[in-house]
Image: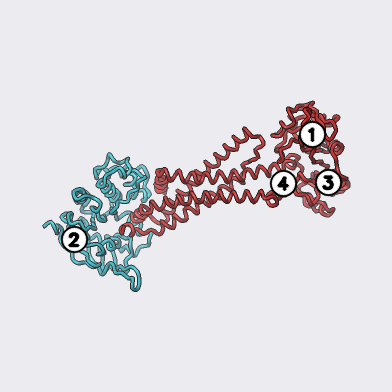
Chain colours: A cyan, B red
Amino acid sequence: MADIAIEAAGLNKWFGEGEAKTHAVKDVSFEAHLGEMLYVVGPSGSGKTTMLSMISGILRPNGGTVKIEGTDIWSMSNDALADFRLHKIGFVFQDYHLFPRLTTAENVAIPLILQRRDWDDALKEAAADLEIVGLKDRAQLPPVKLSGGEQQRVAIARAIVSRPDILILDEPTASLDGETGRNIVKFVREHILSDHRCIVIVTHDSRIYEFADRIVKMEDGKMAGVEKGTLDAQ
Amino acid sequence: MRGILHIAYKLLVNDRAKYAALLVGITFAVFLMIEMTSLFAGILLRASATVINVGASIWVMDPAIQTVANSIPLPDYVLDEVRSIPGVKYAVPLYSGSALLKLRDGTYQAANVIGLDDTSLFGRPMLLSGAIEDIYGENAFIAIKDSEFYKLGNAKIGTEFELNDHRGVLVGIAHVVSSGLFGVPTLYTTYNRARQYLPNPRFTISYLLVEPKSPADVASIKQQVQKAGYLALTKDEFTQKISDFYMYHTGIGTNMLIMTVISFIIGLSISGQTFYTFVLENIEKFGALKAIGAKGRELIYMILFQASFVALTGYGIGVGLCTLIIWLARLNLPDYAAIITYGNLSTAFIMVVLIAAISSYFGVRKVLKIEPFDIFRG
């Protein structure tokens, strides 16, 4: 078994107090490994986004621990955790969240710029990553001039530009048609996943289950099981 | 940090519609604030024109005086009394009054008349043509070539006029630092001639101009003059007293203050609302930046930079526009009393900084409240 990338133990999260209290995640524990593509699946309201937020260091759990490559991320200060995310975790958001007033290359370069890298060097590296996702010739265009699939690939390029060990994709196919979504995830599987990287995808799109190594199923805030990939494809 | 600010800059200027709206708001506010305060400064400068032009270190006057134009004559013995005060290097009388001139074409024109001490001619203007000794000639007057000069009807050396049924003749044309406030020409002559030619009350000395032996003597001279029942003010104090009168006792200051505050509110309304909308439109992007790893203070720097950049750019354009308008106005209206002072610029700058601070405050609050989790949650 490869090295453990993410180790979540006894994660609990609730919102509100008293009668309004909602227990979104209940005693969830799992591991994800480097070189693995792990899916978190479940119906709406099952707690998968809350869980994803806790393991990626942007939502503090009420109970439990999250270790990324052995580091307990929730014992860090806010600034240290922000730095940790910047260097170790790449995010691909459901709506991409690209800046429409920046060029595609500038959007991709943002994590490097946040790392205080030189502007021109950051743009050069961004251009190289745009080449990886097949959008080299779109570098100077604003994202609004790109198709949904292309914007998704720009978001992926932005997520990998700082060479993070963990890549988090939130509903990567939600805004895409079936064929484009499938191609995107296939592309991620073939070109972005490596022995030194763990990819966690939150989805409820069963058409892409075939690309998963393992699938964590969630229901009502609890883990309903961990299964081998290609769940529905079989 | 430069890279983050570079992103902030691009986000701002590439949103051309909002950037333009922000600039228009700030520029308009700065223009109005500087224009208003410049007009006021111009009025105040002209109100103190005689004080500035004569240039005496200390002015002795009746304590009831509010402006230089409305002098209350002093008895002659005050001159002797002031001259006897220790620390006074010299003291001379000054006549300041108004007269109605009858010009050669038969028209009448009001004028200021300044009568300089016959012996010293202390406070004399800088002659552009003619010789200062000619002021001692019969019926001699010197005209000031300022924005009101043309009202003397194409006057030149030798031009004659009537003043209170006395003949007057121009023997010189001179220049002074500041034109008067009331839009009338200014004539200089000797103190005694002014006293003879113009109808006068019992006392004729408008002001005593005093030069101390050293700056250290000013305080004691003022004290001694006060003991005699009169008021001694330095040039700056007298100018301030005149400014205070116009500012607090005429309504001009209040009106200018109201206009300046309205300009500030207009600028704040336009810029504040536009900037807040700009932040709101980008709020999810700021949340995404937070999720990626941007720290709260870095997002604050971005917003402060954007607010400062637009404020300073708008300030620069506003100052430039105001300068241009005043310049154009002066080309066509020589009387246009507006002067941009460091005080005006500082006031407008402080107002603009306030606008930027208030505008960015709400944006910063919004950005600090956004949680990266909200981005995931949609």
Of the pair B310 and A54, the residue shown nearer to us: B310
Picture quadrant where residue B69 is located: top right
Disc number placed over residue A215 in the picture, else none: 2
Residue type at the position of mark 1: Leu
Determine whether the residue tagged by mark 3 lies in a helix, strand or loop.
loop
Q: Position of residue B336 (x, y in %)?
A: 65, 38
Q: Which residue is mark 1?
A: B101
Q: Distance between the Cα atoms at labels 4 and 3?
A: 19 Å
Disc with the residue nearer the chain's start (1 vs 3): 3
Q: Position of residue B350 (x, y in %)?
A: 56, 50
Residue at far front of view: B106
Residue type at the position of mark 3: Pro
Q: Which residue is mark 3?
A: B73
Q: Which is more foreground, mark 2 or mark 1? A: 1
Q: Which is more foreground, mark 1 or mark 4? A: 1
Q: Which is more foreground, mark 2 or mark 3? A: 3
Q: Is residue B149 above or below residue A194?
A: above
Q: Residues within 10 Å of mark 3 (few under 14, many from 20)?
A: some
Disc with the residue nearer the chain's start (4 vs 3): 3
Whether residues under marks 2 and 3 lie with C-beta atoms below 8 angstroms apart, the answer is no
Q: Residues within 10 Å of mark 1 (few under 14, many from 20)?
A: many
Determine whether the residue tagged by mark 1 lies in a helix, strand or loop.
strand
Q: Which residue is mark 4?
A: B239
Q: Residues within 10 Å of mark 4 (few under 14, many from 20)?
A: many
The structure residue drawn at horizontal position 36% and vertical position 54%, both measured from the top left corner, is B284
Q: Distance between the Cα atoms at labels 2 and 1?
A: 104 Å
| Chain to which the residue tagged by mark 2 belongs | A
Q: Distance between the Cα atoms at labels 2 and 4?
A: 85 Å
